[in-house]
Amino acid sequence: MSSPKETTIDSESELLNSYNLMDHRIPKTSDVVVVGGGIHSLIYAIHLKKKELQNQSQKSVTILERNQSPGYKIGESTLTVFGLWLKLIGIDTPMLARLFGPKDGLVFYYFSALGDPEDYTAFIANGPPADFVPTLQIKRKVSELMLTLFAQRLGISVLHGKEVMVDTATLAPQDCGITLQVKDSETK
């Protein structure tokens, strides 16, 4: 009787990459490659993949992120459009409420360059009710991790620790598409 094979995870990127449905290595080909695994890149790729799934298409989507794991940034908050994006891809308010704190609106101030600094206009952007589309006080690392796992479950390959080497020769069209040079950012 054989015992299960033990695998050792040596880095955060190996752990995150192991959650990809297909493989944790860079694919030989991909229909769409997104360089960068931040919030906007992830949302873009998720929207694309969901559209492809609705159309019963099987195009492959790969995200290549240089960092080993989602990064930390202080003091991040969102506008209503971020909550709307999440709602459109299927991440609803109850889940967001468990992960992030509410942000009670946002105010923009317009000061005339020629006028009195005490004379300004305030634009209050509270958005729709928070139970419909919330504005959130988020933690970047948590939001990127949530979107990474969501993307991987849709079949998007999200690969951390992969740095794309971009230059004019790399982006020159070839007969079979564009070839990207990628290196492991762990082995710098």
Image (tube, rainbow, N blue to C red):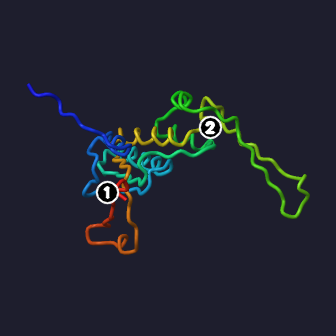
Residue 91 on image: x %, y %: 48, 35
Say above or below: 171 vs 20.
Answer: below
- Where the N terminus falls, by quadrant? top left
Judge whether 150 appears above or below 62 on screen: above
Q: Nearer the viewer, residue 125 or 184?
A: 184
Q: Residue at x 10, y 28 (%)?
A: 2
- Label 2 Cα crowd, 10 Å radius (few <14 / some 14-19 / many 20+): some
* Residue depicted at 37% across the width and 46% down the height: 13
Which label sits on residue 137?
A: 2
The answer to whether mark 2 and mark 1 are in CB contact below 8 A is no
Residue 31's tag is 1
Q: Secondary structure at mark 2?
A: strand
Amino acid under disc 1:
Asp
Q: Residues within 10 Å of mark 1 (few under 14, many from 20)?
A: few
Residue reaching furthest to the left? 1
From the viewer's side, name the closer residue of 70 and 63.
Answer: 70
Residue at image position (38%, 61%) is 164
Residue 177: where, in percent of width, then height? 30, 67
Residue 77 in percent (x, y) is at 62, 42
Indicate which disc, 2 or 1, sits on the residue closer to the N terminus: 1
